[in-house]
Structures are given as C-alpha cells and as structure tokens.
Amino acid sequence: MENEYNLSLHKEKQDLSSDQLLQVIFDYASKIANEKDLDRLLMIMADMGREIVVADRCTLWLVDQNKNELWTKVAHKIDEIRIPSDSGLVGHAVQTGQPIYIDDAYGDERFNANVDKQTGYRTKAILVIPIRNNDGEIVGAYQAINKMTKAEKFSEKDLRTLTLAASYTGKSLESALLAHEIEETQKEIIFTMGEIGESRSRETGNHVKRVAEYSKLLALLTGMSETEAELIKMASPMHDIGKVAIPDSILKKPGKLTKEEFDEMKTHAEVGYNLLKGSNRKILRAAAVIAHEHHEKWNGQGYPNQLKGEEIHIYGRITAIADVFDALASDRVYKKAWDMERILNLFKDEKGEHFDPELTDLFLENFHSFVEIKDQYRDDS
Ligand code: C2E
Ligand code: SIN
Ligand code: SIN
Ligand code: SIN
Ligand code: FE
Ligand code: FE
C-alpha cells in the first residue's frame, strides 16, 4: 500500500499554464535534439508526456512486429516489460488506432491488471494514444497513468496535447529505431515546437510546413547557400511559438481584435524570443531572431522594436513575407482566405512599406512557385 500512500501525497499538482507548457516543451525539445541513444530518448519522451499532462507515470510502448508484442523500457522503476500486442488498453489502442481515455481502469474490461500485479501499482485514470510512423502504421503508443491534480482524471485538453506530441514522436521514433537520420529527427522536433504554438490558434500543421518551404525558397532566391536556406527552413516554423502564451479568448476570437487584445497578441514576438534566445544551438538561435523580428516592417512601423530596413535581420524579412502570404492565402478564425489576385496586389502595395523591396520583387517574380508550394501542402489534404 506504499504506492497508494505516495500517490495521495502528490494529488495537489496543478495543470500546467500555457507558459509552463511551453517551457516544458522547450526544455525537452533541446534534450531530445541532443539525445542519440534510443533508450534514453524514450525516457525523455515519456518524461515530457508525463509533465505535459501532469500524470504520475507515462510510458512509451513500442510494437515489436517480430514477436507480436508491445515492449517498453521506460516504465519508471522497471527495466523492461513485454505484453502481447493485443492485450490490455495499450493493445486495444494499437489494434484499433483509437485513443483511449478512461477515469478508472478497473471499471473497464479491456484493462489488463497483470501489469499492476507485477508491479504492485494501482492504475486509475489512463490516457493511451497510438503513435504512427510516416507511413501511417502504428508503431507504438503513449500511455499516461494517474492524473496528479485534484480532478484525478485526464481532460479533453490532455488528450489533445498528448495526441499532438504523439503524432510527432511517431515519426521521430521510427528514425531513432532505425538508428538513422538523427538530423531529420531534430527537424521534427523543431516542427513539433512550431506546431504546438500554431495548434492553439487552430491553424493546421501544414501552416508551419508551408512557411518553412516559402522561407527556404526565398532564401535560395536571394542567393543564400543551400545550408543556410535549410537552416531558415528549420527555424522558421517556430516564428509564432510565443502564441502559446496568448489566452484562447484572444487567439481563437472569431472576429476582429480590440486594440487591447491586439496589444496582448503582439507580445508573442517578444515571448517567443525570450524562450528561444538562451540556446547556443544554431537552429534555435536563428529561430529566436525569427520569432523576434517576423512582425517588424521595412518602413519601421512594425513590432516589437520598430526596426527599419536592413536593421531587420534578413531571416526576419524573409519570414515576414512567408508568414503573411500564408496567413492571407489561408482561412483563419478571423478571416476567409484571399484570392491570389488580391494577395498579389497587397504585396505590390506593401513593397518597401511592410516588406523588403528586393525580397518582394523576388517573391512576385516567382509567385507561381510559391503557389505551387501552397497547393502541395493544402490544408484539406
Ligand atoms: P496570423 O494570422 O498568422 O497573421 C500573420 C500576419 O499576416 C498578420 O500579422 C498580418 O500582417 C497578416 N495578415 C493576416 N490577415 C490579414 C488580413 O486580413 N489583412 C491584412 N492586411 N494582413 C493580414 P499581425 O497583423 O501582426 O497579426 C499577428 C497575429 O495576430 C495573427 O497571426 C493572428 O494570430 C492575430 N490577429 C491579427 N488580427 C486578428 C483579428 O482580427 N482577429 C483575431 N482573432 N486574431 C488576429
Ligand atoms: C513545470 O515544469 O512547470 C511543472 C512540471 C510538472 O509539474 O510536471
Ligand atoms: C495493461 O495493463 O492493460 C497493459 C498496459 C495498460 O493498458 O495499462
Ligand atoms: C523525437 O523527436 O521525439 C525523438 C528523437 C529521435 O527520434 O531521435
Ligand atoms: Fe506572428
Ligand atoms: Fe504564423
């Protein structure tokens, strides 16, 4: 009964605020980016899941195709557990591809209490989310156990947040399992961070992919090297990461923002910068600059620092065009997508005002290439 006792001691925890959530994600993203060993990586990912949903435990189960089993090395205190791949709640989630979200495991017939028997642990609330690889095959599952807040159960929001994490760890996991393409994985993490920022404003994951591609294309058009263009591509998805700190009432407001609301919205540039600036990693340093300067304007009337012309870092000037093009070409909670004619006119008007005139020319001369990228990463596909 020692476990029951320990459990009750910890039920005072609170759900994470938006800032804490962002901090947790940020802390783990850099750890994950630096970790090349699969076992430790799984631990880190499990710990991140645990903190995100404020669970007592979080486990990453992996499918062993050869043995038709699920295995994990990350259960806290236990080295390795194996269960048949159709057993229990995790088995059920893996077989059906559906997440599971229950308040008391013992009231659910799919629950296999054998693991509890082996470990002496008392499972109550459970959240299980299948993880898919790039091909959409299920490669494992995230399983969070026992909610440590007063509510003692996982919420809709926990399900959403962990689902988001799971949808990206799936891709990363596969590359780690193959022990290849660590660099690819680091890119995924960067996207994950960006998409978590965007997801709260209900923009689709494709938004950050498109902004990344537009930014890279613009970088290449200015004559930057492939390496630097790739750096911008990896960093630009994080331009709006600071939006995680903006309340839903503003972020998801269907209509126009009041002046006060917009003032608060504008803090996302500074917030994002402050979170990213501490890193020495190249990609994150570029991301910090981009988060900070993507809303500065060539004419000095942007925010947060009213930088002017070439005072604005070239990465900021590039991302500004990519971000606005994508915002205009997409539906947002507060506006419908614009047609291409209207978008072209805005860029012509804003050349030398909002946007760097040389970059604007390159953008307009190659407009069809940007439209191609847009069509390739459509929101409905
Ligand atoms: P976002 O939706 O990603 O938009 C990025 C930028 O695209 C905007 O930066 C703006 O420069 C441009 N943009 C987007 N929609 C329009 C438009 O309808 N007309 C024009 N001329 N430009 C547009 P901005 O203005 O600094 O806004 C930053 C963020 O603030 C936006 O990111 C969005 O999340 C939010 N936001 C801005 N206006 C509204 C609004 O009226 N309602 C709501 N709910 N959010 C808004
Ligand atoms: C935090 O880092 O803000 C809290 C983490 C946790 O309690 O799980
Ligand atoms: C089981 O105990 O059912 C296996 C893992 C889980 O679903 O809790
Ligand atoms: C991850 O991105 O979450 C895992 C990193 C890796 O697969 O190397
Ligand atoms: Fe922004
Ligand atoms: Fe954006």
Image (cartoon, helix red, strand yellow):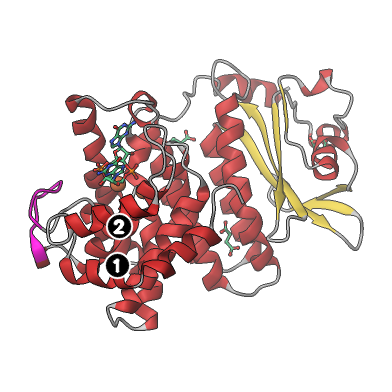
Q: Which of marks 1 and 2 is nearer the N terminus?
A: 2
* Of the pair 51 and 379, the residue shown nearer to us: 379
x 62%, y 49%: residue = 167
Q: Answer yes or no: disc 2 within 8 Å of ligand 1.
A: no
- Which residue is at a point 53% across and 58% down the rendered structure image? 377
State the SS at label 2.
helix
CA–CA distance in space, label 1 to label 2: 7 Å
Q: Which residue is drawn at 36% across and 23% down?
A: 249
- 352 relative position to 13: left or right: left
According to the picture, the residue beneath numbered tag 2 turns out to be 344
Q: Position of residue 2 (x, y in %)?
A: 69, 25
Q: How crowded is mark 2: few (under 14 residues within 10 Å), some or many (20 or more)?
A: some
Which disc number belongs to residue 364?
Answer: 1
Kind of residue at disc 1: Leu
Mostly what secondary structure, the magenta segment? loop
- As for residue 21 lying within the magenta part, the answer is no
Q: Is residue 100 above or below residue 40?
A: above
Pointer 1 with pointer 2, Cβ within 8 A: yes
Q: Is residue 230 above or below residue 5?
A: below
Percent of width and height locating residue 300: 7, 53
Name the quadrant where ligand 2 sits.
top left
| Amino acid type, callout 2 | Leu
Per the rendered image, the range of residues in magenta is 299-309
Residue 128 on image: x %, y %: 71, 36
Q: Could you tell me if residue 288 is visible in this image?
A: no
**Residue displayed at 27% across by 65% down:** 318
SS of the residue under disc 1: helix
Say whether residue 138 is visible: yes
Q: Which of 356 and 6 is in front in this view?
A: 356
**Vertically, is 358 above or below 2?**
below
Determine whether the beta carbon of the residue marked 1 sits less than 8 angstroms from the nearest atom of ligand 1: no
Q: Quadrant of the N terminus?
A: top right
